[in-house]
């Protein structure tokens, strides 16, 4: 259930309130109820993670780090036709929205009912009409306090949608200048200085998404984590393998023996196998076997020594195949330092008329729905 296709059209979502996104959120509730039921302290039984206490809830924000945004366009081919290389294609329609993993999460949070003033999107937005359009599409979904405009132009990503498959064209990102990174740091410091909480934190949930544009140092995510996740109960959801080693090191250093179980790394099975140096028997679209999955989890924990102290969960998607929730704990009956739970893929079409669902942004929507549900459990 962790990798579901969804519509990806900001304009249509505004009209329909994002029904596929909301449906996904309901399905994600199953995942998060399971996840939250494992959250425990050392001295007591099962408890919910106290990430947003009643006293601080109104002051705490969801911060989504999405440094590599884009303007997303869909070039929809006429019904019954598909992309043929070398041919001239005329679109039946052109659709436009935001692109980038962090931006997708922000839209998903909005569809799940999280108020715009509760979501800060840390992003670099390129100059020119493309950047202006992205800001316009996001203006009613996020707080712009952590948005930095750049001198480079906004990239555009285009999905060519055929009847049988889609083709994604991804433009390169512009280079982030040191002064632009410094500006983001200053804007974070401004929010910290104006926070009304006792420990001067403002981030109750942190979501780190995707790749980084050129110009960002490998330790960028770890540096942002250390500045943003100052509350010891801050929920942290990571959907990126970029700069993972320094990020896990920073997360492990911030944990204590009494820390709540509030950190999760979301990645797909192919990424996990690659990180763990595990060779799979088929292609990525074929999915992984249970044996390969277990070997990948073990290999990942051995390769990244800070993963176990830093993380409580792995949320593993596998395309159209079942996903898995891995609880990293020594409290198991199998002798392994983890427990794996299978999550079947939900059918979003069982209560709707047949229609095309676009897979671009599906995994990001899972991250957004998961974060919204996790947050709502507090």
Image (cartoon, rainbow, N blue to C red):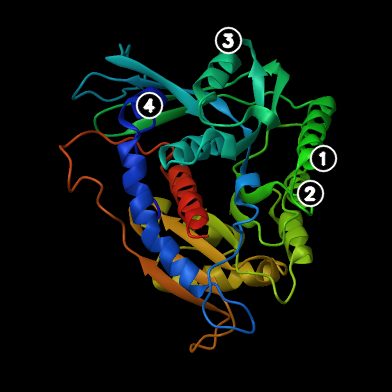
- Gap in angstroms between the C-alphas marked 1 and 3: 33 Å
In this picture, residue 19 sits left or right of residue 115: left
| Labels 4 and 3: the sequence-earlier one | 4
- Gap in angstroms between the C-alphas marked 2 and 4: 34 Å
- Gap in angstroms between the C-alphas marked 4 and 3: 21 Å
- Give the residue pinned by disc 1: 193
The picture quadrant where one finds residue 189 is top right
Residue 169 in picture, x, y percent from top left: 48, 26
In this picture, residue 52 sits left or right of residue 367: right
Do callouts 1 and 2 mark residues in contact (Cβ within 8 Å)?
yes
Depth check, mark 1 against mark 4: the one in front is: 1
* Residue positioned 53% across, 60% down in the render: 378
- Gap in angstroms between the C-alphas marked 1 and 4: 34 Å
- Give the residue pinned by disc 2: 200
Residue 150 in picture, x, y percent from top left: 72, 20
- Give the residue pinned by disc 4: 14
The one of 238 and 242 positioned closer to us in this rendering = 238
> In what element is the residue under mark 3?
helix
- Give the residue pinned by disc 3: 129
């Amino acid at each position: 259930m962790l990798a579901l296709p969804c519509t990806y059209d900001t304009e249509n979502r505004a009209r329909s309130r994002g029904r596929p996104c909301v449906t996904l959120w309901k399905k994600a509730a199953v995942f998060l109820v399971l996840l939250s039921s494992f959250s425990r302290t050392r001295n007591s039984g099962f408890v919910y993670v106290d990430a947003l206490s009643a006293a601080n809830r109104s002051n705490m924000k969801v911060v989504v780090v999405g440094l590599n945004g884009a303007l997303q366009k869909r070039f929809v081919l006429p019904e019954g036709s598909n992309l043929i290389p070398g041919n001239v294609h005329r679109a039946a329609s052109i659709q436009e929205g935001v692109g980038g993993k962090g931006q997708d999460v922000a839209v998903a949070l909005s569809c799940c009912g999280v108020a715009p003033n509760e979501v800060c999107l840390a992003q670099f937005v390129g100059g020119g009409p493309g950047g202006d359009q992205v800001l316009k599409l996001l203006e009613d979904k996020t707080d712009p306090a952590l948005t930095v405009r750049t001198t480079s132009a906004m990239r555009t990503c285009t999905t060519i949608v055929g009847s049988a498959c889609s083709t994604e064209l991804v433009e390169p990102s512009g280079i982030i200048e040191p002064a632009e990174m410094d500006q983001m740091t200053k804007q974070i410091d401004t929010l910290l200085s104006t926070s009304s909480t006792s420990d001067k934190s403002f981030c109750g949930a942190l979501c780190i998404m995707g790749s980084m544009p050129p110009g960002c140092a490998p330790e960028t995510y770890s540096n942002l984590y250390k500045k943003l996740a100052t509350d010891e109960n801050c929920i942290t959801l990571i959907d990126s393998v970029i700069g993972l080693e320094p990020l896990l090191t920073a997360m492990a250093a911030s944990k204590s023996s009494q820390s709540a179980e509030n950190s999760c790394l979301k990645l797909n099975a192919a990424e996990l196998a690659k990180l763990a140096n595990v060779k799979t028997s088929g292609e990525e679209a074929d999915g992984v076997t249970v044996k390969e999955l277990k070997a990948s989890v073990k290999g990942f924990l051995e390769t990244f020594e800070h993963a176990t102290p830093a993380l409580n969960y792995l949320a593993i998607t596998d395309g159209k195949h079942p996903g898995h929730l891995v609880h990293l704990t020594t409290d198991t009956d199998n002798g392994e330092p983890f427990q794996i739970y299978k999550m079947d893929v939900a059918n979003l079409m069982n209560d709707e008329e047949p229609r095309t669902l676009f897979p671009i942004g599906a995994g990001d929507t899972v991250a957004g729905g998961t974060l919204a549900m996790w947050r709502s459990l507090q």
